[in-house]
Amino acid sequence: MGNISISRREPSQAIVRTFSDIEPERINWLWENRIALGKFTLFAGDPGEGKSLATLDIAGRISLGRPFPEGSPCIVGDTIILTGEDDPSDTIRPRLDILGADVNRVHIIEGERLPDGTIKPMTLKKITAFIDAIKQIKDKGHNLSLVIIDPVDSFLVGANSNKNEEVRAALDGLCALAADEKFAIIGIKHLNKNQKGNAAYRVGGSIAFTAKSRAAWIFAQDKLTGRNLFLPLKNNLGPKGGGGFQYSIQEKEINGIKAAFLNWEHPVDDDIRDILKSNSPRHEVKAQAQDEIVELLLEAGGIMKTSVIAEKIGKTIQSTHNALKKLEDKFKVFFSKYGYWEVVQKGPDSMPQPKFTRCLTIPTL
């Protein structure tokens, strides 16, 4: 063993399993290719993007066995909700009623009662409380299918959400219980303000939240199109790519109480990395500058020289030229004559054919 030092205390023993003794098992899905039973799934997004509404929609479907939005089958089962933000009576219950959920199959754990009668707040490490809740559900003749933690950070008491080892320690017990009892976990997280690097680092707190999840889904609005999108950030168990949905947030009234709900519209295959990138402040400035250029051209009669546009909008010649090129790609402007740009008045079909070949890429002053 070379220079490795071994303690004189009784050595520990390695737990070794040979794969010939391990039976292969297929993945069991709650929502096919999106949320697996026995696994931890992450829903992340900025506040107000519909994460909580989506989890309640899923809980409602499970309570009734109603198919998922794209038509895949749904098992009948119970849901446990841990909520640190929404009020059970004036927010969650009305939302479930709007969905037509069987509320006998949706439960909330509000705390843990100790043997001496003391009540303590619920945390993810209270595995005995989860076990007791599952027993109560089974005593009704039901099976637990889903645990919703909204948001995860509210139930990490005693753990630092920015430290990998503490996040994993907080999640490990419940994830092990989920694997044994075959229920899915959906944890809700907010996005941070980081606009650079890998999209996985947009999920707030430690990277362990994303790493621990077997699938992570982002709720985001594409600011260029106004679409609300549910898109995969990672999916270790399902097919690579796809599975996304466009959705809208709507409102209904039932028994005199208004409540919001999430309406799944149709499948999409957008890449979340592109959406997050286009939503960054840097890209918003570019889009704003493009709109400003079109408005400026229209005010000037539809045609203007590059250098004049740059002076008017307070940008460099090169950045103005780059913005004009993007507008040209969108068929909003065209290079009408040497050094000048013109607004497309009636769509791309109205763009005149150029009478010369444009060779230079640097705009003329």
Image (cartoon, rainbow, N blue to C red):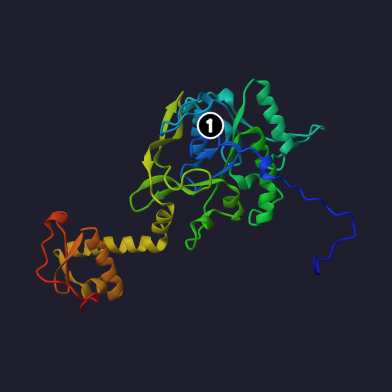
Mark 1, residues whose alpha carbon is within 10 Å: few (<14), some, or many (≥20)?
A: many
Q: Secondary structure at mark 1?
A: helix
Residue 134 position, x and y percent, is 67, 29
- Give amino acid for label 1: Ala
Residue positioned most to the left: 355
Residue 242 position, x and y percent, is 42, 45
Residue 324 can be seen in this image: yes
- Numbered label tally: 1
Residue 86 position, x and y percent, is 56, 38
Q: Quadrant of the N terminus?
A: bottom right
202 or 15: nearer the viewer = 15
Please determine whether, in this image, residue 347 is positioned above or below residue 266: below
Task: Provide the residue designation for mark 1.
Answer: 59
Q: Residue at x 66, y 40 (%)?
A: 22
Relative horizontal placement of residue 287, taking residue 151 as reference (left or right)? left
Q: Quadrant of the C terminus?
A: bottom left
Residue 81 position, x and y percent, is 60, 35
Relative horizontal placement of residue 112, taking residue 148 as reference (left or right)? right
24 or 218: nearer the viewer = 24
Relative horizontal placement of residue 145, taking residue 115 as reference (left or right)? left
Q: Residue at x 70, y 45 (%)?
A: 18
Q: Residue at x 25, y 66 (%)?
A: 325
Relative horizontal placement of residue 132, taking residue 43 as reference (left or right)? right
Residue 313 can be seen in this image: no
Residue positioned most to the bottom: 365
Q: Residue at x 64, y 20 (%)?
A: 141
In the rendered image, which quarter is residue 6 located in? bottom right
